[in-house]
Amino acid sequence: MKRFFSFGLVNLPSFIWLWKIAAWSLGFAIVAYLLLAVSGGWIFAKRQQCQPCAFWLRPLHVIVGGVMIALILLLLGIGIVGTLGHFGSLGHSWHLLAGLTVVSLTFLSAWSAMQISLMRPWARLLHVSTNLLLFIGFLWVSLTGWDVVQKYLP
């Protein structure tokens, strides 16, 4: 018999499905992050050489960034639902702070990307700096997430 937990009026599948979705989502988010690093580096290199980049590169960078934002929001939702469903409250480990840090850095990166222009030279530096911090955030959330999963395993 499958184990279900009740969250309000919604019956959700057992936590193992949430963990699997979260694991895949985090994996895809990290792949998206790496694709963004490569495409962003390519855009930067072309800019330094005063050459135009391929017509598809910037749209790809923006689309992959949007996908990463969606994955991060999915992870946030899974984390909240899973923790509330299992413990009844939030804040049982450093994983909450790590996750909120990654969410914040992701949105700061997206916002700063939308500010990049010749009139706002600070925006590019903020965007790149935020993404470097996001690398550390992904490491932190991965390590703390491993500890959280160990609490759930029978």
Image (tube, grey):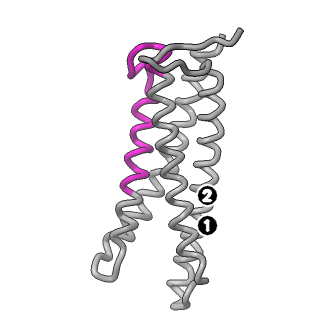
Q: Answer few, some or many: residues within 10 Å of disc 2's Cα (few below 14, many 20 plus, some between 14 and 19).
A: few
Mark 1 and mark 2: Cα distance apart in space: 6 Å
Left or right of residue 25: residue 108: left
Q: Secondary structure at mark 2?
A: helix
Q: Amino acid at mark 2?
A: Leu
Q: Which residue shows up at 65% across the image and 39% down it?
A: 24
Q: Which stretch appears magenta?
A: 83-108
Does the magenta segment cover residue 85? yes
Q: Name the residue furthest front.
A: 9
Report the residue that reaches farthest toward the left: 119
Residue designated by label 2: 34
**CB contact under 8 Å: marks 1 and 2:** yes
Q: In the displayed structure, would residue 138 be above or below residue 52?
A: above
Residue 64, quarter of the rendered image: bottom right
**In the rendered structure, which amino acid carries the disc numbered 1?**
Val
83, above or below 25, in the image: above
Q: Position of residue 11 (x, y in %)?
A: 53, 18
